[in-house]
Image (cartoon, helix red, strand yellow):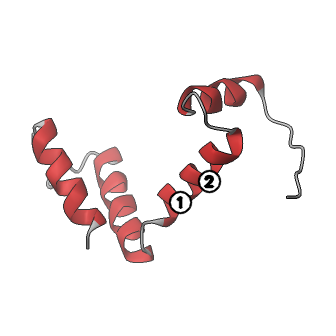
């Protein structure tokens, strides 16, 4: 296996360390983060970004109060679509 050395700021090192489980390497954490962000299709990403833009501009038309359980259901539904 070939390895590379990269430079990161101490804050980023700390964050990566906090994301890692006891037996995880930084490579494990980076692979997890990459796979997490690659799971969204372009259409899903556009939808999320559009909603974030609406929210940040004060448009709360699609904003509703959710319980954590409701949010988990919605996330699961999006991940499976």
Q: In this view, does 48 lie above or below 43?
A: above
* Residue at (15% x, 53% y) in the render: 73
Residue 54: image quadrant is bottom left
2 with respect to 40 (left or right): right
Of the 4 image quadrants, the one containing the C terminus is bottom left
Q: Can residue 70 be seen in this view?
A: yes
Of the 4 image quadrants, the one containing the N terminus is bottom right
Q: In this view, does 38 lie above or below 72?
A: below
**Where's residue 32, x and y in %?**
55, 51
Question: For this rendering, which residue is in front, 24 or 26?
Answer: 24
* Residue at (10% x, 37% y) in the render: 67
**Where's residue 20, x and y in %?**
57, 33
Residue under pointer 1:
35
Question: For this rendering, which residue is in front, 74 or 24?
Answer: 24
**Where's residue 37, x and y in %?**
50, 58
Measure the C-alpha gap from mark 1 to mark 2. 6 Å
Q: Is residue 63 visible?
A: no
Q: Helix, strand or loop at disc 2?
A: helix
The local crowd at label 2, few if under 14, some if 14 to 19, many if 20 or more residues have their Cα within 10 Å, is few
Q: Do the residues labelled 1 and 2 touch (CB within 8 Å)?
A: yes
* Residue at (35% x, 45% y) in the render: 56
Question: For this rendering, which residue is in front, 47 or 80?
Answer: 80
In the image, which disc is placed on residue 1? none
The local crowd at label 1, few if under 14, some if 14 to 19, many if 20 or more residues have their Cα within 10 Å, is few
How many marks the image carries: the answer is 2
Residue under pointer 2:
31
**Where's residue 34, x and y in %?**
58, 57
Q: Helix, strand or loop at disc 1?
A: helix
* Residue at (36% x, 70% y) in the render: 44
Q: In this view, does 53 lie above or below 28?
A: below
2 with respect to 46 (left or right): right
Q: Is residue 76 above or below residue 29?
A: below
């Amino acid at each position: 296996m070939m390895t590379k050395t990269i430079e990161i700021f101490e804050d980023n090192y700390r964050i990566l360390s906090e994301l890692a489980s006891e037996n995880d390497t930084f490579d494990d954490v980076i692979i997890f983060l990459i796979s997490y962000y690659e799971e969204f299709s372009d259409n899903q990403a556009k939808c999320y970004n559009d909603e974030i833009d609406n929210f940040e501009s004060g448009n709360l038309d699609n904003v509703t109060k959710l319980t954590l359980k409701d949010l988990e259901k919605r996330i699961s539904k999006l991940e499976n679509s």
